[in-house]
């Protein structure tokens, strides 16, 4: 009987040891999963930061080129305005003289289509 109870005792101890090992393995697995999750989060954060940095570089490059184009258009516009002002100043006097001569020098002629009625 004692040998039987010893055998049962050994079985219970073996069962308890197996249960402890199983729980320990579950804890290790849980830790490893948590660690893997943290590593994955760190990796995704790093990747996201890298992509955002690249995006900002491209965006600043595009905005820089757009501001350059804007400056170029502004310069062209100012140059065109200056050219038009020079042209205005050069031609203003002659145009005014032409207008005044057309208005003031009237020729009183009878129109071709006018019919004299008696």
Image (spheres, rainbow, N blue to C red):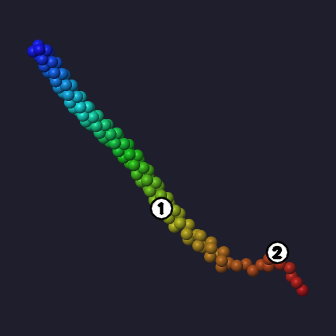
* Residue 82 marker: 1
User: In the figure, residue 17 lies in which quadrant?
Assistant: top left
Question: Crowdedness of circle 1 by 10 Å Cα count: few (<14), some, many (20+)?
Answer: few
> Is 8 located above or below residue 76 in the figure?
above
Q: Residue at x 59, y 70 (%)?
A: 95
The residue sitting at the front extreme is 1
Q: Position of residue 27 (x, y in %)?
A: 20, 30
> Is 15 located above or below residue 85 in the figure?
above
> Is 95 located above or below residue 109 in the figure?
above
In which quadrant is the N terminus drawn? top left
Residue at the disc numbered 2: 112
User: In the figure, residue 7 lies in which quadrant?
Assistant: top left
Image-based side of 52 in relation to 117, left or right: left
The residue sitting at the bottom extreme is 118
Q: Position of residue 15 (x, y in %)?
A: 18, 22
Near-viewer residue (25 or 76): 25
Q: Residue at x 70, y 79 (%)?
A: 106
Near-viewer residue (52 or 109): 52
The earlier-in-sequence mark between 2 and 1 is 1
């Amino acid at each position: 009987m004692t040998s039987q109870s010893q055998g049962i005792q050994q079985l219970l101890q073996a069962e308890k040891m197996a249960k402890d090992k199983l729980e320990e393995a579950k804890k290790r697995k849980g830790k490893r999963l948590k660690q893997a999750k943290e590593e994955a989060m760190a990796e995704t954060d790093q990747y996201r930061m890298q992509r955002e940095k690249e995006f900002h570089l491209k965006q600043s490059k595009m905005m820089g080129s757009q501001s350059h184009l804007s400056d170029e258009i502004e310069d062209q516009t100012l140059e065109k305005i200056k050219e038009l002002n020079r042209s205005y100043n050069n031609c203003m006097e002659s145009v005014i003289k032409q207008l005044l001569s057309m208005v003031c020098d009237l020729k009183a002629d009878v129109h071709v289509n006018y019919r004299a009625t008696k």
